[in-house]
Structure formats: C-alpha cells, structure tokens
Image (spheres, coloured by chain):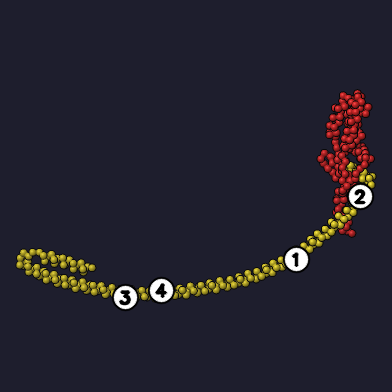
C-alpha cells in the first residue's frame, strides 16, 4: 500500500512538471533530464512495487499454508480429544447402566419376595375371614331357626293357655281379676 | 247447692249408661207427676216441684258431664248383678261420685284396662301373658 502511494505521488509530480511551460532551453533540458529521471523513478518504483507485491503474495501463500497446517493439526487433535471424550463418556454410561441394572435387579428380587409374602398372608387372612363368616352365618341361621321354632312354640303355649283360661275362668274369677286391677291401679296412684 | 235428682241417680247408678237410662225414666215420671197430675211437689224425689223441676233436670245433665268417669274394659260381658258388684266396689274403694263406663274385649282373658282423663293402664291377663313370653320360652328351652 505504501509503495502504491509513492507511485501515485511520483506520477502526479511528473504530470505537473510535464505540463509546465518551459521558459528557456536550459529549462527544456532540465525538463528532459527530469523526465528521464522521472521515468527511472517510475520504473524503480514500479519494480519495487512489483517486488513488494510478489513478496506479499509469497507471504500470503506461506501464511495460508501455515494456517491450513494449523487447522489440520487442530482438527486432528480435536478428533482425538473428541474420540477420547466419547470413549470416556461411553465408559461412564456403561458403568452407570450396569450399576442401575444391578440395583434394579436387587430391588426387584426384594420386592418380588415381599409381594409373594404379602400375597400369602392376604390369602391366609382371606381364607380365615371367609371361614369365620361361614361359621357366623351358620350360627346365625341356627339361632334364627331356633328362635323361630321357640316363638312358634310360645305362640302355641299362649294360645293354649288363653283357651284354657277362657273355659276355666268363672265370673267370680273375672270379678276378682277386675278388683285386683283396681287395687294395682290404686297402688300405682293411677286412681 | 244440691241437686236432689242428681243425688238420687248417682247414688243408685254408677255406670253412665245406667244413669242416663234412669234419668230418662225419672224425667218422664216427674213430668207426668207434676204437670199431668198437676201436683205442686213431687213425691218421687224430695225437694222437686213444678217451679224447679226443669232447672234441676238441666242441671243434672250438666253435673253428669262434670262427674269423673272411669272407662273399664273387661274380658267378659257382665250382667246387671256383675255391674252392680263392680259399681259398689268402685264407690266403696275409689269414690262415691265416680261414674264408670264398662266395655267388653274378650281378648283380655281376664283383668281390666282402666282409662281415666285420657290416660290408660293395662292390667289385663293378656298383657301378663305377653310379658311372660320370655319365661315360657325359657321353660320350653329348658325342657
């Protein structure tokens, strides 16, 4: 960029002097000399600029090459580290899975044992409960049947007593029972 | 103030029905004696005359309504002698002015249900038998 700037400045000076009107022959010679020198300068500048550009291009190629190498190196290192990380991660995952599986199996065995034990207890309890219920039902039925029979017997006895009393009680007995009722009512302060 | 008609009837009749029958008969007799036979004073009931008879008869019905009444339900149908016996017992043991109203219910077996002023007491043998059901059942169970 500096070389290009210098070149532009020189061309501008050259143009300035070229268009200036020569006053004398000396001036014309000097002008010719200056023109020649200017051409030399331009050439040198041009050459120098070309060298600079070439050098810059080489530098650029070199840097690009270095960058590419760096990138490949980084990529290779990254792949290695990534592969290592994946391997480590896989290892941890496998270990965790194994631990979890072992724990789960152990818990499952324990719970299975508990469930079987509970089922056995429940079944025994249920069977006992059904047996008790059946015994109670049988006892209730027996009692209700006996009560019914007893009630029937009492009804028969009552009816018999009533029939016998009706036949056996005389008017005098009836009057005595009425007086007895009055006495009881007086004793209870009802009369 | 005493009412000779009421005093006479209540003395001779302890049942309400008997009292009312006697009252009806006595009213007719007094009317005939005092107004048809034109006697100034009655020979049937002392203290009754033409002037006061109607008032005394009206008063007698009012006094009957005010008299204490016992309703007695018994198991048999009593004849007049039985009614008299019951009436005399009541008059002697309960009170002279008490009227009785006799009813019959053979299911009672014996004894009586006595009602007074809307309250009732069951002294029948039917109730005693019912109360003895448990004892009868126990007797049956024990064989």
Residue nearest the viewer, comparing A127 with A39 = A127
User: Can the viewer see residue A12?
Assistant: yes
Dot 3 falls on a residue whose secondary structure is helix
Q: Residue lying at the far front in this picture: please name it.
A: B36
Q: Are discs 1 and 2 located on one and the same chain?
A: yes
- Asked if marks 4 and 1 touch (Cβ < 8 Å), the reply is no
**Which of the chains is red?**
B
Mark-to-mark CA distance, 2 and 3: 142 Å
Of the two numbered discs 4 and 2 on the same chain, state the one appearing first in sequence. 4
Nearer the observer: mark 1 or 2; the answer is 2
Q: What residue is shown at x 84% (from left), y 40% (from top)? A: B116
Residue highlighted by disc 3: A65
Q: Position of residue B82 (x, y in %)?
A: 93, 41
User: Can the viewer see residue B89?
Assistant: no
Of the two numbered discs 1 and 3 on the same chain, state the one appearing first in sequence. 3
Residue highlighted by disc 4: A78
Nearer the observer: mark 1 or 3; the answer is 1
- Asked if marks 1 and 3 touch (Cβ < 8 Å), the reply is no
Residue highlighted by disc 2: A166
Quick check: A161 left or right of A124?
right
Residue A83 in the image: above or below residue A137: below
Q: Position of residue A69 (x, y in %)?
A: 34, 75
Q: What residue is shown at x 94% (from left), y 50% (from top)? A: A168
Chain of the residue where label 4 is placed in the rendered structure: A
Q: What residue is shown at x 86% (from left), y 40% (from top)? A: B71
**Which of the chains is yellow?**
A
Q: Position of residue A117 (x, y in %)?
A: 67, 69
Q: Quadrant of the C terminus of chain B?
A: bottom right
Q: Position of residue A116 (x, y in %)?
A: 66, 70
Mark-to-mark CA distance, 1 and 2: 52 Å
Residue highlighted by disc 1: A131
Dot 4 falls on a residue whose secondary structure is helix
């Amino acid at each position: 960029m500096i070389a290009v700037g210098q070149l532009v400045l020189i061309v501008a000076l050259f143009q300035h002097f070229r268009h200036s009107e020569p006053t004398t022959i000396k001036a014309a010679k000097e002008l010719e000399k200056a023109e020649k020198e200017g051409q030399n300068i331009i050439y040198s500048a041009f050459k120098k600029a070309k060298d600079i550009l070439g050098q810059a291009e080489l530098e650029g190629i070199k840097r690009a090459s270095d960058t590419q190498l760096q990138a490949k190196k980084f990529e290779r290192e990254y792949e290695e580290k990534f592969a290592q990380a994946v391997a480590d991660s896989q290892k941890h995952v496998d270990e965790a899975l194994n631990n979890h599986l072992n724990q789960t199996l152990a818990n499952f065995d324990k719970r299975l044992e508990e469930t079987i034990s509970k089922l056995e207890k429940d079944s025994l309890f249920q069977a006992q409960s059904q047996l008790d219920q059946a015994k109670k039902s049988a006892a209730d039925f027996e009692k209700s049947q006996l009560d019914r029979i007893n009630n029937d017997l009492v009804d028969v006895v009552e009816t018999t007593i009533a029939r016998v009393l009706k036949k056996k009680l005389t008017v005098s007995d009836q009057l005595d029972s009425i007086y007895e009722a009055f006495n009881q009512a007086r004793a209870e302060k009802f009369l | 103030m005493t009412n000779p008609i009421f005093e006479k009837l209540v003395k001779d009749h302890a049942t309400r029905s008997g009292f009312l029958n006697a009252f009806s008969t006595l009213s007719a007799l007094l009317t005939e004696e005092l107004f048809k036979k034109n006697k100034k004073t009655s020979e049937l009931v002392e203290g009754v005359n033409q002037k006061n008879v109607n008032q005394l008869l009206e008063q007698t019905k009012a006094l009957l309504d005010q008299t204490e009444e016992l309703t007695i339900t018994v198991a048999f149908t009593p004849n007049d002698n039985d009614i008299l016996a019951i009436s005399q017992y009541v008059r002697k043991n309960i009170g002279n002015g008490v009227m009785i109203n006799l009813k019959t219910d053979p299911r009672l077996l014996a004894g009586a249900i006595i009602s007074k002023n809307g309250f009732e007491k069951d002294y029948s043998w039917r109730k005693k038998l019912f109360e003895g059901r448990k004892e009868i059942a126990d007797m049956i169970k024990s064989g």
